[in-house]
Amino acid sequence: MPKHQPTPGSMGLSSPICPSFLAAPTSTDTRLKQIAQASTGFVYAVSRTGVTGAQKNLPEDAQRLVERLRRITDLPIAIGFGISGPQQFSSVGKYADAAAIGSAIVQMIEQNPRKEAQAVAEFIEQLSTFSRQPSQKTAAKARRLAGAD
């Protein structure tokens, strides 16, 4: 179990949420199992050690971490920390179920004053040319987790 697992009530929420915890490349297998068991929506795999932010290259640790998590859980796995463009987005899509691209979007906003929404929309459009449709297994998992099945 993660050290500090909030509950919906402790955060002032009345409806259920699907907690997703961070798994780092340095996490032990025991810790990865705890993270996977405590997560209900997906597992957020941190692509690298260090701080978040757009990077030119993703380390090989990211794919190895996803492979380790796949042996532990059937939950979807998202990769984040350092994904900054379409090529990395596409690369991550070959082994993970999702990519988190927060810092690159923040950068778009900062670099495009008064045109933030347009810049982000264009960036997302670029990424969408590299996206893939989820596998039937992944889509079924998502529906099950959302309570649609």
Image (cartoon, rainbow, N blue to C red):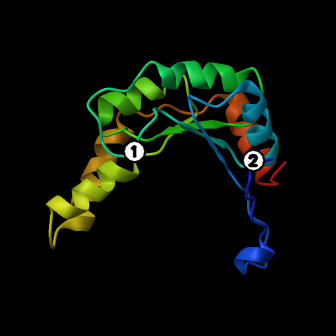
Left or right: 102 as drawn, with respect to 119:
right
User: Can you tell which mark lies on residue 64?
Assistant: none
**Frontmost residue, 102 versus 5:** 5
Q: Is residue 74 in view?
A: no
Q: At x 34% / y 51%, what residue is drawn?
A: 103
Question: Compared with residue 60, is residue 130 higher up or lower down, i.e. above or below?
Answer: below
Left or right: 76 as drawn, with respect to 54:
right
Mark 1 and mark 2 residues within 8 Å of each other at the beta carbon? no
Quarter where residue 33 is shown = top right
Left or right: 33 as drawn, with respect to 88:
right
Instruction: State the SS at label 1.
Output: loop
Tag 1 residue: 51
Question: Compared with residue 35, is residue 5 higher up or lower down, i.e. above or below?
Answer: below
The three-letter code of the residue at mark 1 reads: Val
Quarter where residue 121 is shown = bottom left
Q: At x 75% / y 20%, what residue is drawn?
A: 71
Whole-percent x, y for residue 74 in the image: 77, 31
Whole-percent x, y for residue 119 in the image: 22, 58
Query: Mark 1: few, some, or many residues within 10 Å (few <14, many ≥20)?
Result: few
The three-letter code of the residue at mark 2 reads: Ser
Tag 2 residue: 39
* Alpha carbons under labels 1 and 2: distance apart: 22 Å
Whole-percent x, y for residue 64 in the image: 56, 18
Q: From the image, state whether disc 1 or disc 2 is nearer to you.
A: 1
Q: At x 62% / y 35%, what residue is drawn?
A: 77
Question: Compared with residue 135, is residue 4 higher up or lower down, i.e. above or below?
Answer: below
Question: Compared with residue 147, is residue 114 higher up or lower down, i.e. above or below?
Answer: below
**Frontmost residue, 105 versus 56:** 56
Quarter where residue 106 is shown = bottom left
Q: Is residue 34 in view?
A: yes
Sequence-wise first label, 1 or 2:
2
Instruction: State the SS at label 2.
Output: loop
